[in-house]
Image: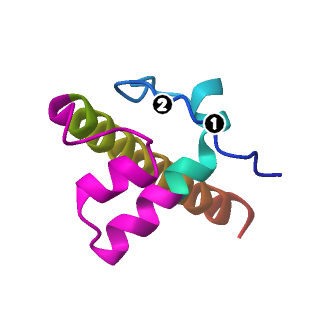
Amino acid sequence: MLKLPNLHIANAAPTSSVLTGYDEDRMLTYIRLLDASAEGTDWREVARVVLHMDPEREPERAFRAWATHLARARWMTRKRNELRQLHDEWWG
């Protein structure tokens, strides 16, 4: 079950090679970032609406948070796809 978005977003996403509690708590945020990216939404709007950061007041912080969280969301998507492929190879 997806959790409601946690409004506290770190200045940078985790870099761990495994899914973290932080990631799990912000799964909906990651999905929203991927959707916004697919739609070509400007990073400043995404930072404001999804990450609840002010890109005008703190542009470096907002950009770093947006970029690292989007990269983390893409990493999770790649990992999921790799796991699916392994599953299919093993269990066909």
Secondary structure type for disc 2: loop
- x 76%, y 51%: residue: 2
- x 31%, y 43%: residue: 66
Report if residue 46 lies within the magenta region: yes
Residue 3 figure quarter? top right
The crowd level at tag 1 (other Cα within 10 Å; few <14, some 14-19, many 20+) is few
Task: Out of 87 and 9, give the one closest to the viewer.
Answer: 9
Relative image position of residue 84 (x, y in whole percent): 61, 60
Would you say residue 37 is visible in this rendering? yes
Residue 22 figure quarter? top right
Task: Out of 68 and 63, give the one closest to the viewer.
Answer: 63
Residue 59 figure quarter? top left
Determine which of the numbered discs, if any, sits on residue 9 in the image: 2
Q: Which residues are magenta?
A: 32-60
On screen, residue 30 above or below 13: below
Relative image position of residue 62 (x, y in whole percent): 27, 36
Which residue is under mark 1?
Answer: 6
Report if residue 8 lies within the magenta region: no
Q: Residue furthest front?
A: 57
Task: Out of 57 and 63, give the one closest to the viewer.
Answer: 57
Q: CA distance from mark 1 to mark 2?
A: 7 Å
Relative image position of residue 79 (x, y in whole percent): 49, 48
Classify residue 29 as left or right of residue 37.
right
Circles 1 and 2: CB atoms closer than 8 Å: yes
Classify residue 78 as left or right of residue 60.
right
Would you say residue 74 is visible in this rendering? no
- x 16%, y 31%: residue: 60
Quarter of the image with the C terminus is bottom right
Q: Residue furthest bottom?
A: 39
- x 33%, y 65%: residue: 37
Determine which of the numbered discs, if any, sits on residue 90 in the image: none
Name the kind of residue labelled 2 in the image: Ile
